Image: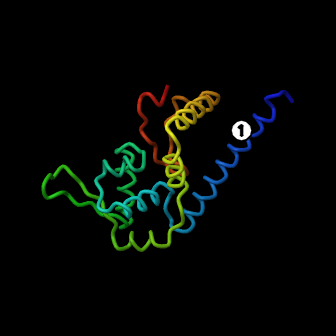
Amino acid sequence: MSKKGPIISNVIDNLRRVFQILNEQSKKVERETGLTGPQLWAIKTINESSPVKVSDLANKLYLHPTTVVGIIDRLEKQDLVKRRRSEDDRRVVWIELTDKGNELVKSAPEVAQGLLVSGLEEISANNLIEIDRSMKHLVKIFGAQKTPPKLIRSTEVNIPNDTDMK
């Protein structure tokens, strides 16, 4: 093993840990709520900020608004959220939890995506830049720079910024 061997081993083991926790948390969410992780993450975020505009929800979830609209569509079909047009500006749509959504959020498990975002928001900008740079290297190793980013254990695809695909 070269001098880099132990470092490579650590990187691979840490990636395994990340994949493992994401997979386990996502399965737990699906088993306990019947929702995908992104759907539950949206519900929890709506609960914290209700009512919330779609654009604000997208910002809080670090997702493209089109992706969030798809998630909201699925949640609305399950009677977990409702849309309400603003009286002042009909273009503005507010999202709120229904009674069923409020009940679900009370007993719902933690969501891996929410933990990740909370943790990343606590990190300094310089460290975030370093993590971003390192993640881009990993993506390049796999040749996945142009692969659209799917949400964890979901069919939803986040529409990335053009700079993210380079």
Q: Which percent across, then down, holds residue 133? A: 56, 30
How many other residues sit within 10 Å of disc 1, few (<14), some (14-19) or many (≥20)?
Answer: few
Picture coordinates of residue 44, whole percent (x, y): 43, 62
Residue drawn at point x = 82 percent, y = 28 percent: 3
Q: Is residue 11 above or below residue 36?
A: above
Q: Which residue is nearer to you in this view: 19 or 49?
A: 49
Q: Amino acid at mark 1?
A: Val
What's the residue at 64%, 28% (across, down)? 141
Q: Is residue 28 left or right of residue 49?
A: right
As helix, strand or loop, the secondary structure at mark 1 comes to helix
Of 125 and 113, the residue lying toward us: 125
Residue at x 34% of width, y 60% of height = 49
Q: Is residue 136 left or right of residue 163?
A: right
Using residue 14 as the reference point, say whether residue 130 is left or right of it: left
In this rendering, the count of numbered labels is 1
State whether residue 30 is above or below residue 157. below
Q: Residue furthest right?
A: 1
Looking at the image, the residue that sits furthest to the left is: 88
Residue 33 sits above or below residue 166 on the image: below
Residue 89: image x %, image y %?
A: 14, 52
Q: Which residue is mark 1?
A: 11
Vertical comparison of 90 with 131: above or below: below
- In which quadrant of the rendered view does residue 23 lie? bottom right
Which of the 4 quarters of the picture holds residue 10?
A: top right
Q: How is the image coloured?
A: rainbow
- Indicate the quadrant where residue 130 lies: top right
Looking at the image, residue 148 sits to the left or right of residue 11; the answer is left
Quadrant into which the N terminus falls? top right
* Identity of the residue furthest to the top in this view: 166
Which is more toward the observer, 114 or 25? 114
